[in-house]
Amino acid sequence: MSKFREIVSKYKNIILLFISSFLVFLSYPKISISEISFISLIPYIIVIFNLKTKKEALKYGFIYGFFTYLFILYWIFPTLRAGDVNTFIAISGVALLSSIMSVEFIIITFFGYLSKNCSVNMMIFLMPSVFVIVDFIKTNITRYLPYFPWFQLGYSQWNNIYFLNLAGLAQVYSITFVIVLVNSLLASIIIEKENGKRIRKLIIAFLILFISFYIGRLRFNDLEKAIAFSDKKINIVVMQPSIDFYMKWNISYVEDIKARIEKLLKEASSLKPDLIIWPENSLYGWIDDPDVFTWLCKNIKETQTYHIVGSISKTNRRYVSSYLISPKCQIIGEYNKRVLVPFGEYVPLRNILGKFIGVIGELGEFEKGNYEQNPFNLKSINIGQTICYETAFDYLFYPDDDVDLFVNITNDGWYLNTSAPYQHFAIAVVRAVENGRYLVRAANNGISAVISPNGAIIDKLNLNEYKIMHKEIKITQIKRQSDIEKNVFVFLSFIIFISFLMAMIFR
């Protein structure tokens, strides 16, 4: 027993970091026990309280980031293996990515260490600020550099519907700020020696949660009323053909793809919708291939309605695209994907990594579309487009109020039955709430859904269901937050951070 205690004592910090990372994993999709997020960081913050040197801060920040991303991004391993990537390379890939992304937590831990040396109260407020700043930078740096901002603590609240509605007022950053602030307060209670201070901090933590929940509930109810009184509607059908992505480009599978889609189209057209939405890359070939386009037109004309079709194109440049197509098969709108998936649609540092990773296969690499693209217009309804994991980038969602409805088409068939499709879906729910608009998600093999402006899942198709989804959507005209209003927690975080730096310089 003494030997066991000795080992635990020696590796106490690493054990605490592992526990914290695992709790974050439990709070995150696919498990999604969202309440755990409010205590998940306590072991991590306790470790920061006990750090003695800057070197320790860097070391344990790396370890925590590595553990956390290893849990969150484990799905990359089975995805790479399904793409015939060597086991060693697949393991190395996950480990390398987790190591690179641990830089986020190295930064957070380092500033947490510096702030706790000033005072416990300084650390309580600096920790949520640095979390928000790191999330904001890693999302927006993708305008210029490749990065993968897949993980944000705020996404863990996708199914905590009242608390989630804070994002409609001040984006997902507000949720992250509150989560980290509550964790910091609770962790400080464990460190605090005076009972009076402990009680005060516990009361403050519960007040913050109560006020956040109450504000979110008010917004949820306001949106419910706005939706109920809306008289602008669109009747849509979402197709989920559940085509085996790893067989998709096998020529012997073409007739099966056609049959699956034609069956769904026949069922969809009988409902006489205004719009039928196909998932990303849903055709059996390139849309500009004459045979493929002829087959597509034949089926569209038979339905006698409008379609949004996801396809790859190569007429001018190689794009991942979506098209708005009229009942007469005229292309009246085109959207080209603006942020491509690393290793799925292009290989960063291709001269080096391209020798080892062949996920792209025979399709080759694609090019980015222009950042400034107009929404589709259908019967006076403006439809904002995103493709696949573009939902992870809030700046891609049109900044004005002209967009009435968002459509996200995706193909998560790459990721099998891992956490990835659920994590991807959770991000889409948050984007719907942030923008105060319905978001319709069409996924090849799921999860397809109609998400209301307040985050309620109106209808959905589960993973690997072969089915259509029919809904009438009421278009809301709720005014969206201005850039200043929606980024208030980002501004607050920078103010706190700069104040801390000034205090460090002039103390």
Image (cartoon, helix red, strand yellow):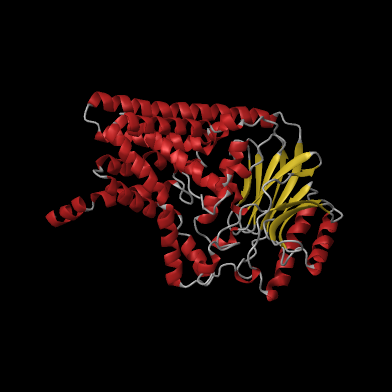
Disc tally is 0
Quarter of the image where one finds residue 110: top left
Q: Position of residue 13 (x, y in %)?
A: 26, 49
Q: Position of residue 316 (x, y in %)?
A: 76, 61
- One can see residue 187 in this view: no
Q: Residue at x 67, y 32 (%)?
A: 227
Q: Residue at x 42, y 39 (%)?
A: 130
Quarter holding the N terminus?
bottom left
Front-lying residue, 379 or 238: 379
Q: Residue at x 31, y 43 (%)?
A: 43
Seen as rendered, the residue at the extreme bottom is 252
Q: Position of residue 15 (x, y in %)?
A: 28, 51
Seen as rendered, the residue at the extreme left is 2
Quarter holding the C terminus?
top left
Q: Residue at x 60, y 42 (%)?
A: 395
Left or right? Give the position of 317 relative to 80. right
